[in-house]
Amino acid sequence: MPPTMPVPAASPPVDISERRLVGVHAECVTNVSSTEFPGHYPGEDHSWDLNAFRRSLQVNITRLSQRSIDLDLIGVDPSIANAIRRTLIAEVPTIAIEHVYVWNNTSVICDEVLAHRLGLVPLTVDPALFEMRDDDGDATDRNTLVFKLEVECREKPGAPADSSDPDELYENHLVTAGMLRWEPQGEQADMDQLRGNPPGPTNPNIVLAKLRPGQVIEMECHAIKNVGKEHAKWSPVATASYRLHPHIVLLKQPPLGTALKFANCFSPGVIKITDDGIGEERVEIDPQRVREESMSREVFRHAEFEGCVKLGRVRDWFLFNIESEGPYAPQDLFPAAIRVLRARVGTIKRAAEALASGEEPEVGGAVLNEQGNNADEDIVMMES
């Protein structure tokens, strides 16, 4: 994993047209709706041009750490940005514990509660190494990982009689995720990817249960591959969100003696105060920190600042924040979501081509009828 790496943020362009702006005013927000066909306007030629799209599209990483990434996505419609966000949360596959076989559990935590906690433990396993397992399919070494959890709490010999610290009194009084032991099945022991980086929790310090002397937990856990829309435990991200880039235009200087008050109406660092050389303070916008503005609209509450500033957001400039909580490095999550989207678009394209040629479209292994559904069940437009 890379260390925390701040990257200089891109400066907002000075030639942002009104079409790209969402107006932020004291009592309302304007120009919030896109056109019926994104990027197209009546009476103008907006024919699809791949080269023009490439020139307008930008993806810039602004911050990268071991577990999170901030990036700018510029030049796409909000529907595309939201599709990427939803795909990150619900469509990028991971591996998580699904089946728990309890041989012995004398702790105070119920079997089903402990099984639920085990399922939520993120695992460091590359999902690409395994196949999806059908609901009624058999467990094999190609679709299932097996973990053992065997813990017994004992009293420490020679523990201080006057101590009340469990760390001094007991052994294994805390059951943590790091106690999960991978049991290779079939050919898994011969896989270089698993042998060099044995499957386990991303954080071995997650507390699963607390024990006291004489209490025992013995379990076998089976982990399988799936996606977040089935259950949140398969979501590869802790969060994936975006916001629109702020746009601030300084129309005139605030009244004399109010520069500090004016700057305090914005997020720290967004407004800089400078001396013009004749003893008067002036304000200016820091283009590198304007992205930090929260758009609180505090400036509109003060009558003396009326007409000093114009606020907005750029409708096609998305500031993404993605937190990884699984096997993916933060910089790999965005491309992974794009690959899933491309596969889904490919499925729809093949179905459309089949319809155009007069054939019955086959989607997800089932043939669509005239209503777009299978005779027995609804069709999910996706590929595993």
Image: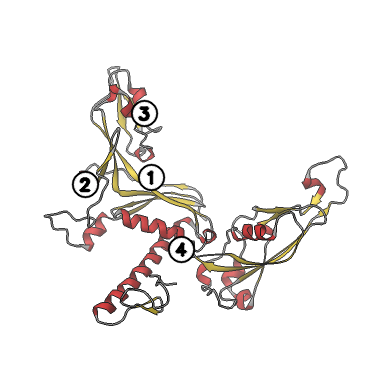
Q: What numbered label is drawn on residue 135?
A: none
Residue to which mark 3 is pinned: 265
Sequence order check, earlier mark of 1 and 4: 1
Task: Place residue 299 in its image quadrant.
Answer: top left
Mark 1 against mark 2, which lies toward the viewer? Answer: 2
Spot occupied by residue 363 in the image (x, y as percentages of width and height): 37, 76
Q: Amino acid at mark 3?
A: Cys
Element type at mark 2: helix
Residue to which mark 4 is pinned: 92
Q: CA distance from mark 1 to mark 3?
A: 25 Å
Residue to which mark 2 is pinned: 19
Name the residue located 31 percent from the left edge and 53 percent from the top edge.
78
Q: Are marks 1 and 3 in contact (CB under 8 Å)?
A: no
Sequence order check, earlier mark of 3 and 4: 4
Spot occupied by residue 321 in the image (x, y as percentages of width and height): 43, 49
Q: Quadrant of the C terminus?
A: bottom left
Residue 226 as seen in the image, left or right of residue 72: right
Sequence order check, earlier mark of 1 and 2: 1
Q: Amino acid at mark 1?
A: Pro
Give whichever of 192, 207 is nearer the camera. Answer: 207
Q: Amino acid at mark 4?
A: Val
Can residue 36 be seen in this snapshot? yes
Question: In the figure, 118 relative to 134: above or below?
Answer: above
Element type at mark 4: loop
Task: Place residue 50 in its image quadrant.
Answer: bottom left
Sequence order check, earlier mark of 3 and 2: 2
Q: What numbered label is drawn on residue 8?
A: 1
Residue 164 as seen in the image, left or right of residue 37: right
Q: Amino acid at mark 2?
A: Arg
Q: Are marks 1 and 2 in contact (CB under 8 Å)?
A: no
Give whichever of 88, 365 is nearer the camera. Answer: 365
Spot occupied by residue 34 in the image (x, y as percentages of width and height): 25, 51
